[in-house]
Image (cartoon, helix red, strand yellow):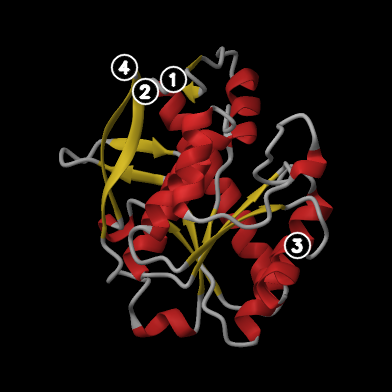
């Protein structure tokens, strides 16, 4: 997402999938962009256990930045000849959330999805005309705004619509037997093997929540999950068609 040319190539692949009859839904993040603007505003980014501490001011800034990212992606998709609609998780109460804690620590306005109201856009007759692009913010029962991890949103959306495929585009090769050796890529894995990787301590760092999301998805009606190196040109098309 931070490489404009690479981002354009990925979006071109997604729009191609839409044009040949797939029904893609894009869920985006914007963590690095948020950090950039937090620093520009003279605020210091804070993290606990890898999760951004989001106070009221940071949440306001994050929502502005994520909205900007959302509409830039809509603009890019539209420029490629596909109708697109940018959706905040707040629109039509698409994403209902509860406050998230990190090992019992308060990290501010960070939420976890408790309910997806997929009837709003994702199951409406309009879905065949538009490519939905979802911004990862939502509201709790008191209508407070929360930032949500984009991987968590993608997983919740995939579960809600019983997606055939859930794809995470990352900036690493994928799940590695040895995190320091890209040649140890595990090309295919089932749920039992994934649990063994957790127990053996092979899965570390940022791959832990990603693989947990994968397990949650396939255990809840999503047929297959892919973790792809988004830096490789056409990795999405190669995986889906091969």
Residue 56: mark in rendering? 2
Q: Residue at x 71, y 33 (%)?
A: 178
Check the image and report above or below for 82 versus 113.
below
The residue where tag 4 is placed is: 106
Q: From this viewpoint, which residue is outermost toward the left?
A: 142
**Mark 4 / mark 1, whichever is N-terminal:** 1
Q: Secondary structure at mark 1?
A: loop
Task: From the viewer's perspective, tell me whether residue 126 is left or right of residue 206.
Answer: left
Quadrant position of the C terminus in the picture: bottom right
Which of disc 1 and disc 3 is earlier in sequence?
Answer: 1
Measure how far apart labels 4 and 2 are at the Cα level: 13 Å
As helix, strand or loop, the secondary structure at mark 3 comes to: helix
Crowdedness near tag 4: few (<14), some (14–19) or many (≥20) residues, C-alpha within 10 Å: some
Q: Secondary structure at mark 2?
A: helix
**Residue bearing mark 3:** 235
Residue at figure coordinates x 56%, y 12% from the top left: 44
> What residue sits right under mark 1 in the picture?
53
Quarter of image, res 102 = top left
**Circle 2 or circle 1, nearest the eye:** 1
Q: Residues within 10 Å of mark 3 (few under 14, many from 20)?
A: some
Q: Left or right: where does residue 67 sit relative to residue 18?
A: left
- How packed is label 2: few (under 14 Cα within 10 Å), some, or many (20 or more)? few
Rounded to the nearest angstrom, the CA distance separating label 4 from label 1 is 8 Å
Q: Nearer the viewer, residue 222 or 187?
A: 187
Numbered disc in front, either 3 or 2: 3
Residue 80 place in picture, x, y as percent? 72, 75
């Amino acid at each position: 997402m931070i490489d404009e040319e690479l981002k354009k190539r990925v979006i071109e692949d997604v729009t191609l999938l839409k044009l040949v009859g797939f029904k893609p839904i894009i869920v985006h993040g914007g963590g690095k962009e948020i950090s950039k603007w937090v620093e520009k505003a003279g605020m210091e980014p804070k993290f606990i256990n890898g999760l951004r501490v989001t106070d009221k001011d940071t949440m306001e800034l994050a929502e502005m930045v994520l909205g900007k990212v959302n509409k830039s992606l809509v603009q890019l998709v539209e420029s490629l000849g596909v109708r697109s609609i940018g959706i905040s998780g707040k629109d039509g109460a698409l994403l209902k959330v509860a406050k998230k804690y990190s090992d019992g620590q308060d990290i501010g306005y960070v939420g976890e999805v408790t309910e997806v109201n997929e009837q709003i856009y994702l199951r409406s007759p309009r879905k065949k005309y538009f490519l939905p692009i979802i911004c990862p913010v939502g509201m709790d029962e008191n209508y407070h705004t929360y930032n949500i991890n984009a991987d968590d949103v993608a997983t919740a959306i995939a579960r809600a619509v019983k997606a055939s495929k859930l794809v995470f585009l990352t900036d690493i090769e994928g799940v590695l037997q040895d995190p320091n050796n890209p040649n140890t890529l595990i090309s295919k894995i089932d749920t039992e093997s994934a649990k063994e990787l957790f127990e053996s301590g092979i899965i570390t760092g940022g791959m832990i929540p990603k693989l947990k999301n994968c397990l949650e998805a396939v255990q809840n009606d999503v047929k297959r999950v892919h973790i792809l190196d988004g830096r490789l040109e056409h990795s999405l098309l190669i995986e889906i068609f091969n």
